[in-house]
Image (cartoon, rainbow, N blue to C red):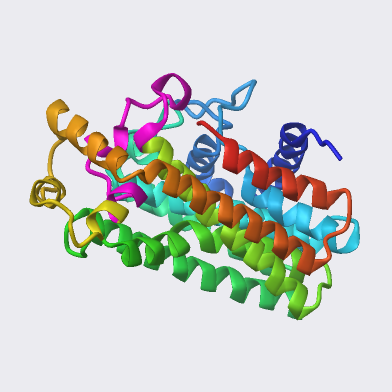
Amino acid sequence: MSVDLDSELTRLGELTDGWIREAVVKHLSPAAGRLAGMLEYHLGWRGTGLEPLARPAPAGKKLRPGLVLLVSRAVCGEMTQAARNSAVAVELIHNFSLVHDDIQDNSAMRRHRPTLWSLWGMPQGINAGDALFALAQVVLTRDGSALSARLSAELNTTALGLAEGQFLDIDMQDGNTPTTLEIYEAMVARKTGVLFAAACRMGAMASGASDAQCEAYAAYGLQLGIAFQEQDDLLGVWGLSAETGKPDAADIVERKRGLPAAMALSREDAPDWLRTAYLETDGELSGEIVGRIIAHFDALDLRRSIEARVEDRYRHALDCLDQAGAREPARDYLVAICEALVSRRT
């Protein structure tokens, strides 16, 4: 069955936005009105002067809350209240991580807009990220049920995994941890995979799924999340600037230790010049070295190897959906998400 994935994700994203708006209004006090405005700026609802925007700024596809809600429907045919709370919490945790990532990466821009911390300073940026984290907990546990406690435990375990993934990423980029395929896989499973897995597990938990079903949906999400990052790393080297909006070979220019670099540097025959290029941690690489690295990656046929890895994860994710017994039409959307991630070019 053919489905309109973009329209459905847009619809679910708008629902999630509405629930988050309600949570911000309900749980942040008038005394901290500017803090609420900063959160709403980051979420795309206000401008740099904290004025409301007639049309929200681009804020991503909200794939993670969409997964929560689609899995809920795949389990029981509807979006339960616990699933709605979980969708909000997952999206808030994702944005908490983005606010802190921007500070750690010293990033001045996100989605073509100034980052929160670049406008209001690092202390307020850290505080705003903390507020997003805390608000996720409040929304998830506000009904005081045993189910909400289990969902909160899942979310906090996931947040710890995100912190571990960010630690490994920073440590690897700083040269304190070797750039190996093993370390890369550990990092990406935590930094990206765990939140996709948690979104799917929480959607299942919130809808009365069995333990086996919850595990199957979580496995689907994990494969999806890792495939998402591996495809992103592929585009960081071979993506077209006109499609990605980034400079050609941006990840090489910036010495990012993504999957292509990890695969090349993990080889026993990795040349000394390549290791030297990635040992440095400051500044961008010259055009000559960038071209040499791309040629080396091409000689190793890394692009095709990565495409095969992503395709394998796609098939594994579909097997997990079968094991979970996902019902239609939600299953069609979950399949379509896999297909979109494998074929994406931006």
Where residue 126 sits: x, y (%)? 37, 52
| Between 146 and 127, the one nearer to me in the picture | 146
Relative horizontal placement of residue 254, taking residue 338 as reference (left or right): left
Q: Quadrant of residue 313?
A: bottom right
- For residue 206, say whether it is visible: no
Say which of 267 and 195 sits in front: 267
Q: Is residue 236 visible?
A: yes
183 displayed left or right of 269:
right
Q: Residue at x 38, y 51 (%)?
A: 100
Q: Is residue 176 left or right of residue 87?
A: left
What residue lies at 84% left-to-right and 63% top-to-bottom? 75
Query: Which residue is located at x 67 percent, y 51 percent?
Result: 65
Image location of residue 162, percent across then percent down: 45, 63
Location of residue 185 (image quadrant): bottom left
Q: Is 190 or 34 nearer to us in this picture?
A: 190
Q: Which residue is more in the foreground, 101 or 322?
A: 322
Residue 245: in magenta span: yes
Q: Which residues are magenta?
A: 237-262
